[in-house]
Image (cartoon, rainbow, N blue to C red):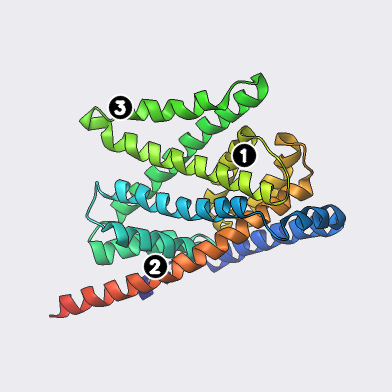
Amino acid sequence: MTERTTEPIRHPVLRRIGLGISVALLLGALLVLWRQRDTVIDALAAIAPPAPLPLAMLFGAVFANLVLSGVLFSLLMSRYGTVGRVEMQALIAATTLVNFLPLRPGLFGRVAYHKSVNGIAVTDSAKAIMQGAIVSVIVAAYAALVALLSMQFNLPLWWGVLAPALLCTVLCASAQMRLWSVIVLVRYTEVLVWAVRYYAAFSLLGLDISWDSALGFSCVSVIATMVPLVSNGLGLREWSIGLLSPVLTSHALSLGLTAELINRAAELLVVTAAGLLGMTYLARRTRTISLQRVE
């Protein structure tokens, strides 16, 4: 990445506040786990050795989320300029890793990259990011409603899950609606993949949860991840899943916290590997473009 990628570190007070919130939330979560360590130890014993299928599901779903995010922003940015598919995947991977810092500096880095390398105006990049956030909120709200109706009225989950896919497929017949239909479908698929992550994380602890509960966790996690002050929902996501665990399942708060920490660990491993590869790719690309411009 170029130096511009880290340029937006301009609000030291806000950055410290964000870091403080994240650290406080994480320490609080760890304190709860320590006080209920017997329950946690019994649960962790279920993943030694871990079951291959849930483990593969978890890591595969984390990677799929990263790829789908790249596809989403490729579609959103296609209205404003040209960004290569591999280039966008590398950029999303790199900035997702950087976003673990307070105030999500990866977002600003992505805007700076598009401006300097792709020639896309800052306002256009900002529009794409805002559009992605709006779509995320709408999709998460719909998925949460489906999960709630399924749990409250014992309705089959598949009817609500398939409805957006069918609607978007129909709307794709219209040239005017095609792009936005695909954008919504990609983001909706991301939310469903998040549900797979939670199903797998709880399964690794030897705990059964329903798919509608997993979808509920997914919606909350997507929204928590979007909160700007806490980087990638660090701490906030852990508490959200922990507090909702007794509500959506029969499992204690401490087990929900543990499941989210397992999810977070898998995320960190995948994002770190993909992010470092992405940074390497982008650094080479920016050097090549700089040399071409000099010539």
Disc 2 target residue: 278
Please state which of residues 100 and 154 is positioned toward the viewer in this rendering. Answer: 154
Packing grade of label 3 (10 A; few <14, some 14-19, many >=20) is some
| Residue matched to label 1 | 214
Q: Nearer the viewer, residue 131 or 263?
A: 263
The answer to whether residue 164 is above or below residue 56 is above
Question: Measuring 80% from the left and 55% from the top, which residue is drawn there?
Answer: 40
* Mark 2 burial class by Cα count in 10 Å: few <14, some 14-19, many 20+: many
Residue 101 visible in the picture:
no
Q: Is residue 18 left or right of residue 3?
A: right
From the image, state whether disc 3 or disc 1 is nearer to you: 1
Rendered image quadrant of residue 231 = bottom right
Q: Residue at x 24, y 50 (%)?
A: 80
- Seen in the image, is 167 located left or right of residue 201? left
Helix, strand or loop at mark 1: helix
The amino acid type found where label 1 is placed reads: Ala
SS for callout 3: helix
Q: Position of residue 204 (x, y in %)?
A: 68, 51
At a point 37% along the width and 47% down the height, the residue shown is: 72
What amino acid is at disc 3? Leu
Residue located beneath label 3 in the image: 171
